[in-house]
């Protein structure tokens, strides 16, 4: 830490990355070869398999170069974030404490404001009822020959509490608890890692069952999860 601030040291990073011309040339050659390939016999299958291996090898070579190039950037980014997080941490602690106090006061003032508004509404309703009763009495005694006026009683103004030009006071609906056993189906999210792990564990038995079926047919591996056989080439 310096006298006036915090120094964050990052490794030296290059500013240029070169994709070799040989790689671009090889890429274009493979693309041209792949665009005209057919696989209809064993010989063509072997040729296409070798082409697939080369395409994967050339593509992965550039991906490795990219990863090597960005390593110092990632390290610098992590170092900067770590130093910034450490510098902000005590500020975030007091921020949370002040936020709790401001929020607690605002919540109490909103509660008082709601009570005052409810009282004002009740008072207006009582005044409207009183005027309606007076009209009925006047009408029954024949004291008012004119059509009764519409009764309109406005609520008394209620002062707004806990308003600030520095922060927005927002009242939200938040989750206070959850019972997974009662959640409706639309709110349940399948766990793909768990499903895939089960399928890998029971791969052999599932394959045996599926091989007895016609191509494209499915079986239920787990209640609600249908599986089928799929054959794909994978580069070595």
Image: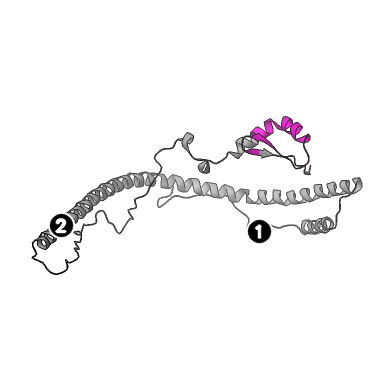
Q: Quadrant of residue 29?
A: bottom right
Residue 10 visible? The answer is: no
Location of residue 112 with respect to 227 vertically, above or below? below
Left or right for 24, reference 43: left
> Sequence-wise, which precedes: disc 1 or disc 2?
1
Q: Name the foreground residue: 155 vs 148.
A: 148
Callout 2 environment at 10 Å: few (<14), some (14 to 19), or many (20+)? some
Residue 222: x, y in percent? 63, 34
Q: Which residues are magenta?
A: 197-225
Residue behind mark 2 = 127
Calculate the distance from the C-alpha at mark 1 to the C-alpha at mark 2: 80 Å
Left or right for 226, reference 116: right
Report helix, strand or loop for mark 2: helix
Say which quadrant the C terminus sits in.
Answer: top right
Numbered mark located on residue 200 in the image: none
Residue 180 visible? The answer is: yes
Q: Is residue 201 magenta?
A: yes
Left or right for 126, reference 7: left
Residue 189: x, y in percent? 55, 41
Q: Residue at x 13, y 59 (%)?
A: 136
Residue 94: x, y in percent? 34, 45
Report helix, strand or loop for mark 1: loop
Q: Residue at x 35, y 45 (%)?
A: 96
Residue 78: x, y in percent? 54, 47
Residue behind mark 1 = 16
Q: Is residue 112 magenta?
A: no
């Amino acid at each position: 830490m310096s006298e006036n601030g915090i120094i964050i040291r990052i490794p030296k990073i290059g500013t240029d990355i070169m994709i070799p011309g040989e790689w671009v040339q090889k890429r274009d050659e493979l693309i041209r070869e792949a665009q005209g390939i057919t696989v209809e016999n064993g010989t063509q299958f072997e040729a296409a398999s070798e082409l697939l291996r080369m395409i994967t090898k050339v593509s992965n070579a550039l991906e490795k170069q990219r990863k090597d190039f960005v390593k110092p950037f990632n390290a610098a980014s992590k170092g900067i974030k770590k130093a910034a997080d450490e510098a902000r941490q005590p500020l975030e602690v007091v921020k949370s404490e002040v936020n709790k106090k401001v929020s607690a006061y605002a919540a109490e003032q909103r509660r008082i404001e709601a009570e005052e508004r409810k009282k004002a509404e009740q008072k207006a309703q009582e005044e409207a009822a009183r005027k309606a009763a007076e009209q009925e009495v006047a009408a029954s005694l024949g004291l008012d020959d004119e059509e009764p006026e519409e009764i309109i009683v406005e609520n008394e103004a209620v002062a707004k509490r806990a308003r600030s030009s520095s922060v927005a006071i927002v009242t939200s609906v938040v989750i206070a608890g959850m019972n997974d056993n009662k959640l409706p189906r639309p709110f349940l999210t399948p766990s793909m890692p768990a499903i895939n792990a089960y399928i890998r564990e029971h791969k052999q038995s599932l394959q045996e069952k599926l091989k007895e079926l016609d191509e494209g047919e499915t079986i239920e591996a787990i209640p609600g999860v249908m599986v089928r056989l799929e054959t794909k080439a994978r580069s070595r």
